[in-house]
Image: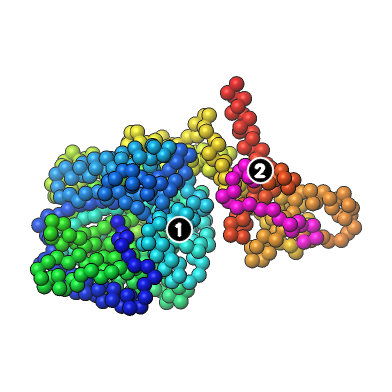
């Protein structure tokens, strides 16, 4: 949970005072670290669950503040998007029935949110990325109205200095130009915390880095973004690009982004990471300085290190070192931030058990990871896992590249079992949860693979929005009702008599996006051939910069023939026949409004423009398709 009590519009004097406080906090941290102040008697675990709030049509709904107010539970808090919510689970000792207790608390919190959302006619979905999110959801109206989120958006956008390009390539290729950070609304995660003794921190942190790839590969659950099939864990790419503060100059100097995996192993002390983050990344947020950490230490107290913690909260390492105070003792923990939310509670708990077991066993069995793996391999492994999930290859401790699933089954799962046993976790929980990982790997049915297979199985004749809504509704049903692991799910199927209307409420839900365009200087014969070959009746005209400047229809070509202009021998170009008085709509235009506009203006096609850029077409044929579905449904009901 991020700190919300921050200053906005800070001046240079405030910035200097806050910077001094951050440095003072680091000095206090170093003193406590060197003098044995940190707790090493008890090992604890914790977690943060992020989730999406959806309406009855499986679309995101901005209800987080309503849910928090109605539930009245301090464990629930906001996230950056108004349709995101976060639940903070209680820390508990890493032993015995800790995993069952965490699982039960998670179910309890999800139940509380579901009960509140039922009053609003909606529900909860756990997914790394909600499949039904549309670009029209990424607006300031859905930005949570807390100073922290507005300041981060303002400063990150300002520092970047230009429109940011989101470019992700998977099965499909997504390219977006954005003027803000709102695409981060698309991401939710299940973050695991493990407390580490100070003397073990370097060894365990390096292992946490090395183990991120296989743990992520088994947990991937975010393959769909804005109707594009991208990475198996697309969150990794989205978060890195959406919060990039680097200007063009800084990118050319190869300055590292604030979301990163790291540059090297930690060698001697965790202070290397903390100092690096202070000197490399400028301070984004400030707050009133309420304590002098060194004075608190001198008086025998335990400083909160609030200034450094606020700065640390704006640097998003995939494995982040964290500081906290529990029962009056300061503690160090590793926060694994790369795991997605979902597909179910038991899947998430299996992911947690796999991570915790490996991180407990591997440092004890092998010692220093630096003796077995280069950091470049660890980082490459991580991004391969994010791209390909269990279908990817990584380099193991022996330096050989193999399928991730094989490494998990043959080498890592047995050691995860040993690690959980080493921590005296209940044997029944070890078997129950790690068996889920084993079967998921054997079947290669991660949440991501289930979504991709479901999408493919619904065929090319089904509208993408219907597929995405069906996938989301099926996920929600499993999460609400049975909580069986994803490897046991049947593929999502569009049910007969499906309530199709919610898939056609706005233009962007069913507009044509696979467009063919021509330029004004192209010959008319090209447009005619295009229409004939691709069975389309309207062709947009763009200039070389991609700006829409006209539209050519089959009627325009028929008029040429009727007027005898095609038989004169003169070569005609598009600019001679195109219409320039374009009537257009936006992606968020309601279908009813678009239909009425077409009737009023007597046009058969409406270009769909987003901030002046052509993103789709809506035609009478699209409406005919919708009408045919309605007619068929009504006739079948009689």
Taking depth in this image into account, of 546 and 582 the one nearest to the observer is 582
Picture colour scheme = rainbow
Q: Residue at x 31, y 43 (%)?
A: 71
The residue nearer to you, when weighing 179 against 352, is 179
Seen in the picture, residue 47 relative to 118 is either above or below; the reply is below
For the question of whether residue 587 can be seen, the reply is yes
Q: In the displayed structure, does residue 4 sit left or right of residue 542?
A: left
Q: CA distance from mark 2 to mark 1?
A: 30 Å
Disc marking residue 577: none
- Residue 487's place in the image compared with 389, above or below, is above
Crowd around label 2: few <14 · some 14–19 · many ≥20 (10 Å): some
Q: Which residue is mark 2?
A: 595
Q: Is residue 298 left or right of residue 151?
A: left
Image coordinates for residue 338, horizontal then vertical, percent: 33, 55
**Secondary structure beneath label 1:** helix
- At mark 2, the secondary structure is helix
Q: Which residues are magenta?
A: 575-596
Observer-nearest of 38 and 272: 38
Q: Which residue is mark 1?
A: 182
Crowd class of label 1 (few under 14; some 14 to 19; many from 20; radius 10 Å):
many
The percent coordinates of residue 105 (x first, y second) are 24, 42
Q: Tell me what residue is drawn at x 25 percent, y 63 percent.
A: 321
Q: Is residue 203 left or right of residue 439?
A: left
In the image, 473 versus 221, the foreground residue is: 473
């Amino acid at each position: 949970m991020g700190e919300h009590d921050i200053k906005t519009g800070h001046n240079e004097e405030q910035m200097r005072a806050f910077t001094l406080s951050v440095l003072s906090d680091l000095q206090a941290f170093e003193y406590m670290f060197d003098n044995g102040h940190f707790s090493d008697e008890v090992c604890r675990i914790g977690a943060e669950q992020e989730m999406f709030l959806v309406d009855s049509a499986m679309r995101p709904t901005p209800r987080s503040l309503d849910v928090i107010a109605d539930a009245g539970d301090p464990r629930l808090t906001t996230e950056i998007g108004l349709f995101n919510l976060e639940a903070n689970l209680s820390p508990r000792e890493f032993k015995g029935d800790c995993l069952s207790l965490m699982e039960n608390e998670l179910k309890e919190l999800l139940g509380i949110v579901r009960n509140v959302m039922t009053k609003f006619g909606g529900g909860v979905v756990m997914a790394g990325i909600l499949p039904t999110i549309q670009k029209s959801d990424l607006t300031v109206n859905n930005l949570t109205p807390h100073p922290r989120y507005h300041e981060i958006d303002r400063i990150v956008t300002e520092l970047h200095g230009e429109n940011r390009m989101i470019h992700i390539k998977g099965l499909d290729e997504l390219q977006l130009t954005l003027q803000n950070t709102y695409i981060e609304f698309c991401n939710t995660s299940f973050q695991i915390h493990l407390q580490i003794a100070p003397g073990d921190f370097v060894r365990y942190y390096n292992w946490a880095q090395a183990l991120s790839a296989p743990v992520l590969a088994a947990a991937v659950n975010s393959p769909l973004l804005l109707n594009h099939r991208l990475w198996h864990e697309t969150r990794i790419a989205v978060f890195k690009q959406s919060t990039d503060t680097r200007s063009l100059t800084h990118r050319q100097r190869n300055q590292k982004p604030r979301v990163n995996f790291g540059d090297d192993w930690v060698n001697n002390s965790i202070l290397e990471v903390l100092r690096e983050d202070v000197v490399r990344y400028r301070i984004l947020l400030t707050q009133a300085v309420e304590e002098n950490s060194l004075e608190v230490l001198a008086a025998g107290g335990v400083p909160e290190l609030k200034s450094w913690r606020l700065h640390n909260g704006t640097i998003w390492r995939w494995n982040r070192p964290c500081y906290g105070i529990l029962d009056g003792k300061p503690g160090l923990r590793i926060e694994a931030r790369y795991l997605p939310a979902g597909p179910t509670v038991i899947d998430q708990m299996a992911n947690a058990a796999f991570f915790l077991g490996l991180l407990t066993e591997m440092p004890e069995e092998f010692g220093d990871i630096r003796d077995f793996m280069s950091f470049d391999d660890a980082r490459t492994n991580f991004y391969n896992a994010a791209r390909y999930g269990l279908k990817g290859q990584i380099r193991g401790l022996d330096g050989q590249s193999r399928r991730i699933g094989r490494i998990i089954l043959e080498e890592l799962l047995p050691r995860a079992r040993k690690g959980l046993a080493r921590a005296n976790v209940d044997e029944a929980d070890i078997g129950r949860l790690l068996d889920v990982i084993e079967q998921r790997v054997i079947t290669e049915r991660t949440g991501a693979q289930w979504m991709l297979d479901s999408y493919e199985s619904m065929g090319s004749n089904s509208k993408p929005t219907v597929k995405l809504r069906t996938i989301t509704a099926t996920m929600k049903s499993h999460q609400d009702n049975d909580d069986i692991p994803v490897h046991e799910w049947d593929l999502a199927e569009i049910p007969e008599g499906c309530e199709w209307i919610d898939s056609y409420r706005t233009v962007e839900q069913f507009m044509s996006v696979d467009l063919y365009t021509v330029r004004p200087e192209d010959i008319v014969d090209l447009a005619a051939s295009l229409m004939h070959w691709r069975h389309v009746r309207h062709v947009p005209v763009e200039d070389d910069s991609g700006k829409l400047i006209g539209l050519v229809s089959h009627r325009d070509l028929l008029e040429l023939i009727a007027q005898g202009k095609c038989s004169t021998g003169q070569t005609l170009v598009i600019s001679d026949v195109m219409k320039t008085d374009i009537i257009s709509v936006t992606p968020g235009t309601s279908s009813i409004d678009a239909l009425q506009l077409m009737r009023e203006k007597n046009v058969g096609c409406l270009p769909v423009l987003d901030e002046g850029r052509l993103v789709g077409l809506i035609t009478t044929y699209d409406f005919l398709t919708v009408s045919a579905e309605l007619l068929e449904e009504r006739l079948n009901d009689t």
